[in-house]
Image (cartoon, rainbow, N blue to C red):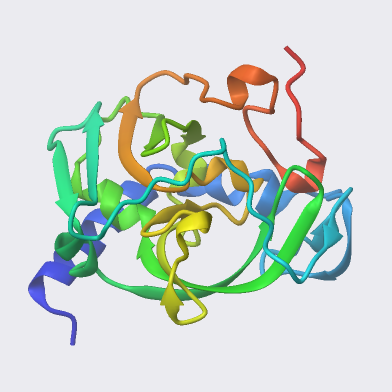
Amino acid sequence: MPDEKTTRIVDSRMRLRRRFLERMRNTPSVADQEPQGSGPVNRHGMPRLPIGQTETRKWPVLDLGVHPSVSTEEWQLTIDGAVKNPIRLDWKAMMSLEQVDDVQDFHCVTTWSRCDLAFSGVRLSSVLALAEPEDGASHIMCYAYDDYTTNVSLVEALKDDVLLVHSWDGAPLPREHGGPLRMVTPQLYAWKGAKWINRIEFMTEDRRGYWEQRGYSNTAYPWRDDRYSDD
């Protein structure tokens, strides 16, 4: 049986998700009537390999050229902005939350995809719910220890497969892949999942992150070949 804390967090997460549930069901990675791609369908009914992607068995390392060295003893995650309850979680607090295992595909905008990555971590929606976002909150900005930023709409961020990941294949997430903790966004291109994440800011208006400011798509839907911005 779940303990009282877990039950409370799950209830908060579900209340938050209900605000966006209908819009989630209509997002391109779930409901696109003409998705572009090939191969058998994934669990959302989309082709396993989005258009323009090539499957690899390796997991290439792409970043801003800096690999922060952050121990679990010093790691922290701040959640603030348009919230009623700003919080700061240390590693012990993160590990005390409900842990989930999920096998996901990983689609990089540079045209490679790695399938069936076995991740363990915490649903992002569980963490976001702790901060009690204001009714007007619509997006988050994710910040990392290497000064990277990326923005994600709450419609996408609250999906159950968006995780804060600390393990891969049963071992701690390697530093070069964002360890000790990174975000993963399997229904979007992978740059929307910040490595070495250390802050999440709720926003009432959208604001673009590092790559979005440099011409990458603001929405990043793989099955629409949504790689670059038109503006």
Could you say where residue 125 lies in the image, as x and y percent from the top left? 35, 53
Is residue 229 left or right of 207 when viewed as pictured? Answer: right
Is residue 62 left or right of 76 when viewed as pictured? Answer: right
Vertical side of 169 occupied by 93: above or below:
above
Vertical side of 77 occupied by 211: above or below:
above
Vertical side of 62 occupied by 73: above or below:
below
Q: Residue 192's image quarter? A: top right
Q: How many marks?
A: 0
In this orientation, which residue lies closer to the viewer: 160 or 169?
Answer: 169
Residue shown at 47% from the left, 21% from the top: 206
Could you say where residue 74 lies in the image, as x and y percent from the top left? 19, 52
The image quadrant where one finds the C terminus is top right
Specify the farthest residue to the left: 4
Could you say where residue 132 lies in the image, as x and y percent from the top left? 20, 41
The image quadrant where one finds the N terminus is bottom left
Is residue 190 left or right of 133 when viewed as pictured? Answer: right
In this orientation, which residue lies closer to the viewer: 75 or 164?
Answer: 75
Vertical side of 111 occupied by 177: above or below:
below
Specify the farthest residue to the bottom: 1
Residue shown at 43% from the left, 49% from the top: 158
Q: Residue 48's image quarter? A: bottom right
Could you say where residue 178 lies in the image, as x and y percent from the top left? 46, 54
In this orientation, which residue lies closer to the viewer: 27 or 161?
Answer: 161
Residue shown at 60% from the left, 56% from the top: 186
